[in-house]
Image: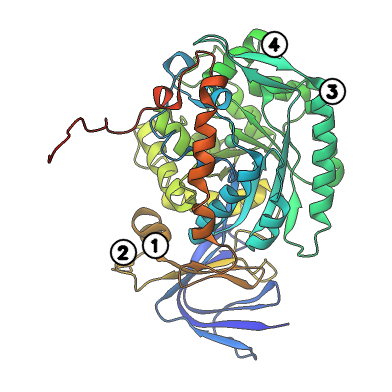
């Protein structure tokens, strides 16, 4: 087993198990052997195959992204940034999902691009929620990331025939077939020789699954000792549908079914009973999540584009909710999502102390690891996996180096991530991904997007074009000569 020794490192974000928090260690050493960290502290005097001079470096734990759709989201670049539907309380999710469809053969390119972007921002563990597509396992294995594959299934799907209503086409038999296929895929990835792939049971949306399917799939996750994830309380539309069907909020409904608790990860549990966007008469959702130690995958980016914020991240934490962070859409940059999480919580609470930089770094590392039921991830400690990112403190955006995490999260972000290791293997070197063809995959995106957009008029209930649904940022020039 090869041993790597980072020697006399300027700054290490080390894990203090006794205090259950990250701490700064100055002038320390970090050593890993094979896939595991074997030393964090001062004065390592053992042997090593590789010694790295730690001057000008900060070592941080690899980031843990607990909610993403990497294969499909890159195809919405240029389409969804300004796309918001007022009649759906601002979310554009339902309009896009009904009107746009990506050729499954294109999805592997999207995944390759997103995985590369995530690695470059220091992510080492990734929850990938998707409907299975050709080539998925190959690109996961090749990426070098620690993957948590969440193959999706639903017993109904959305459709629209007018501008304001969301309707459903139920097909329980298909949902059951897809659930069985998802479990088979999860068992297949667990057996993968890399040891870096595992699975999560993932009914995709609360409103798109029968109670029986939610209960049965939760039980299947418990049997396997793996997490279970679901979109719930992600829109006012969904909240109102659940109230109409069951008389309670989506979270109260899940509590009633007995599916909350350790190992349950809700994306995004944001439009909850007390949210000012919802104003339901109860005030119990946050407590139900906290008391049951349910995890929330908070993904600020898609929502802030709609003008919506979580109200607010700090209160969930204080109630004991396991708070992790996800990227959900592009840019696949978890550092920027940590920054947005902190700032939006302060805006939502009118309180600059509501959420600290330390809080969001905890969520993007240990919080995500706890959600995934993995105490060997998201921390630099003996016995943890050798998943780490090397921050270049000599990058101008990191100077002056008074407080490296503040500099990384609020200023430099991915630009200061130099190297990334997963399972002790270097997968990013000098800000280049070694395992994936980022550029080559990106060159496939335009064709897939063009095909997707060509299909929009046939799929949209009003027969609109993609340009009508989502106009470009600027109008096209009418000039024929020099401007
Ligand atoms: Zn999602």
Dot in front, 2 or 4: 2
Q: Nearer the viewer, mark 1 or mark 3?
A: 3
The image position of residue 73, as x and y in percent, is 53, 41
Residue 122 visible in this rendered orientation of the protein: no
Asked whether the residues under the numbered discs 2 and 1 touch, taking CB atoms below 8 Å apart as contact, a structural biologist would say yes
Instruction: Tell me the CA gap for discs 3 and 2.
Output: 54 Å
SS state under label 1: helix
Q: Which residue is mark 2?
A: 397
Say above or below: 333 vs 40.
above
Check disc 3: other Cα within 10 Å, few if <14, some if 14-19, many if 20+. Answer: few
Residue under the point 41% across and 38% down: 78
Q: Quadrant of the C terminus?
A: top left
Q: Pointer 4: residues within 10 angstroms few (<14), some, or many (20+)?
A: few
Dot 1 alpha-carbon crowd within 10 angstroms: few under 14, some 14 to 19, many 20 or more: some
**Is residue 297 visible in the rendered structure shown here?**
yes
Looking at the picture, how far across and down is residue 450, in whole percent? Answer: 49, 37
For ligand 1, the image quadrant comes to top right
Lower sequence index among marks 2 and 4: 4
Q: Residue at x 56, y 48 (%)?
A: 110
Closest to the observer: 125 or 278?
Answer: 125
- Mark before the other along the chain sequence, 4 or 3: 3
Q: Which residue is mark 4?
A: 246
Give the number of the mark in front: 4 or 3.
3
Front position among marks 4 and 1: 1
Tell me where residue 364 appears, x and y as whole percent: 54, 51
Report whether the residue tagged 3 is closer than 8 Å to ligand 1. no
Q: Which residue is mark 3?
A: 173
Residue, disc 1: 415
């Amino acid at each position: 087993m090869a041993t790597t020794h980072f020697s006399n490192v300027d700054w290490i974000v080390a894990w203090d198990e006794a205090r259950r928090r990250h701490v700064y260690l100055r002038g320390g050493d970090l050593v890993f052997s094979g896939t595991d960290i074997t030393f964090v502290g001062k004065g390592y005097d053992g042997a090593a195959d590789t010694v790295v001079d730690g001057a000008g470096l900060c070592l941080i734990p690899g980031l843990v992204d607990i909610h993403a759709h990497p294969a499909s989201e890159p195809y919405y670049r240029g389409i969804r940034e300004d796309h918001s539907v007022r009649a759906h309380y601002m979310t554009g999710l339902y309009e896009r999902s009904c009107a746009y469809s990506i050729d499954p053969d294109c999805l592997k390119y999207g995944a390759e691009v997103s995985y590369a972007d995530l690695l470059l921002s220091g992510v080492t563990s990734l929850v990938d929620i998707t409907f299975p597509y050709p080539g998925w396992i190959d690109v996961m294995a090749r990426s070098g990331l620690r993957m948590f594959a969440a193959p999706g299934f639903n017993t109904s799907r959305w459709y629209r025939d007018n501008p304001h209503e969301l309707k459903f086409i139920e097909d329980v038999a298909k949902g059951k077939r897809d659930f069985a296929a998802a479990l088979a895929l999860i068992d297949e990835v667990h057996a993968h020789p890399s040891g870096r792939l595992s699975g999560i049971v993932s009914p995709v949306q609360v409103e798109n699954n029968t109670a029986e399917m939610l209960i049965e799939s939760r039980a299947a996750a418990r049997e396997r000792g793996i997490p279970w994830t679901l979109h719930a309380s992600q829109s006012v539309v969904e909240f109102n549908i659940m109230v109409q069907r069951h008389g309670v909020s989506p979270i109260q409904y899940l509590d009633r079914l007995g599916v909350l608790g350790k190992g349950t990860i809700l994306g995004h549990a944001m439009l909850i009973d007390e949210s000012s966007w919802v104003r339901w008469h109860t005030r119990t959702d946050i407590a139900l999540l906290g008391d049951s130690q349910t995890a929330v995958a908070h993904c600020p980016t898609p929502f802030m584009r709609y003008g919506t914020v979580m109200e607010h991240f700090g209160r969930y934490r204080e109630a004991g909710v396991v708070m992790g962070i996800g990227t959900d859409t592009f840019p696949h940059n978890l550092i920027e999502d940590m920054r947005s999480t902190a700032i939006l919580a302060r805006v939502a609470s009118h309180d600059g102390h509501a959420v600290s930089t330390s809080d969001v770094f905890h969520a993007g590392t240990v919080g995500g690891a706890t959600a995934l039921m993995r105490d060997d991830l998201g921390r630099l400690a003996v016995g943890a996996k050798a998943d780490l990112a090397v921050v270049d403190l000599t990058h101008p955006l990191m100077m002056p180096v008074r407080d490296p995490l503040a500099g990384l999260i609020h200023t430099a972000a991915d630009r200061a991530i130099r190297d990334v290791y997963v399972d002790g293997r270097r997968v990013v070197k000098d800000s280049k991904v070694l395992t994936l063809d980022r550029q080559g995959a990106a060159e496939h995106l335009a064709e897939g997007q063009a095909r997707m957009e060509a299909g929009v008029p046939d799929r949209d209930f009003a027969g609109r074009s993609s340009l009508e649904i989502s106009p470009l940022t600027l109008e096209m020039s009418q000039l024929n000569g020099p401007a």
